[in-house]
Image (cartoon, helix red, strand yellow):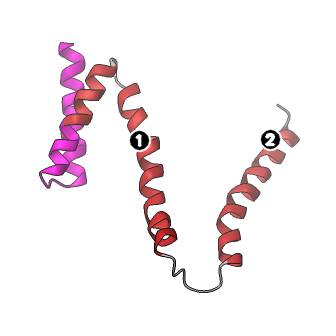
């Protein structure tokens, strides 16, 4: 790819991401009162993060089984009330140990 093509691609990505962020602010002037739309917009970041994270958990380990085991253990640890950092440490340790023994 030539230099000007890369610059065009970068500018198009900047325009696209800013358009997605600026358009709702310009079209919606007041407070959103629709409860369905408010709950939908509230959960969109969490769903997006989950969609990006869960496949990576399973695919980045040496074996998908070790990633799945770490995912299940992480869900259980989070369900028990542990914070983000302890859950991440436990998941890393479980994935490492599962890769060693599987």
Kindly give the residue lying farthest to the top in the view shown. 102
Mark 2 or mark 1: which is in front? 1
In the rendered image, residue 100, in percent from the top left (x then y), is placed at 21, 16
Label 1's element? helix
Bounds of the magenta segment? 73-102
Q: Is residue 84 magenta?
A: yes
25 is higher (above) or lower (below) than 92: below
Q: Nearer the viewer, residue 52 or 3?
A: 52
Would residue 100 be found to the left or right of residue 20 on screen? left
Number of residues whose C-alpha sits closer than 10 Å to that of mark 1, classed few (under 14), some (14–19) or many (20 or more): few
Q: Main secondary structure of the magenta part?
A: helix
Residue at 44% of width from left, 49% of height from top?
Answer: 49
Number of on-image labels = 2
Q: Nearer the viewer, residue 79 or 57?
A: 79
Q: Which mark is residue 76?
A: none
The residue pinned by badge 2 equals 6
In the rendered image, residue 5, in percent from the top left (x then y), is placed at 85, 40
Image quadrant holding the N terminus, namely top right
Residue at 48% of width from left, 50% of height from top?
Answer: 48
Q: Nearer the viewer, residue 37 or 66?
A: 37
Label 2's element? helix
Q: Nearer the viewer, residue 44 or 94?
A: 44
Asked where in the image residue 102 lies, by quadrant, the reply is top left
Q: CA distance from mark 2 to mark 1?
A: 28 Å
Kindly give the residue lying farthest to the bottom in the view shown. 30
The residue pinned by badge 1 equals 53
In the rendered image, residue 61, in percent from the top left (x then y), is placed at 34, 24
Would residue 27 be found to the left or right of residue 83 on screen? right
Q: Are marks 2 and 1 in contact (CB under 8 Å)?
A: no
Q: Is residue 82 magenta?
A: yes
Residue at 79% of width from left, 53% of height from top?
Answer: 11
């Amino acid at each position: 790819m030539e230099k000007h093509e890369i610059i065009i691609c970068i500018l198009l990505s900047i325009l696209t991401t800013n358009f997605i962020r600026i358009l709702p602010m310009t079209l919606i002037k007041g407070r959103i009162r629709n409860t369905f739309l408010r709950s939908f917009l509230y959960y969109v970041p969490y769903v997006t993060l989950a969609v990006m994270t869960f496949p990576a958990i399973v695919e980045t380990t040496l074996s998908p089984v070790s990633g799945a085991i770490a995912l299940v253990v992480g869900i259980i640890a989070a369900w028990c009330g542990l914070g983000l950092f302890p859950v991440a440490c436990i998941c890393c340790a479980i994935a490492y140990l599962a890769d060693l023994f599987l």
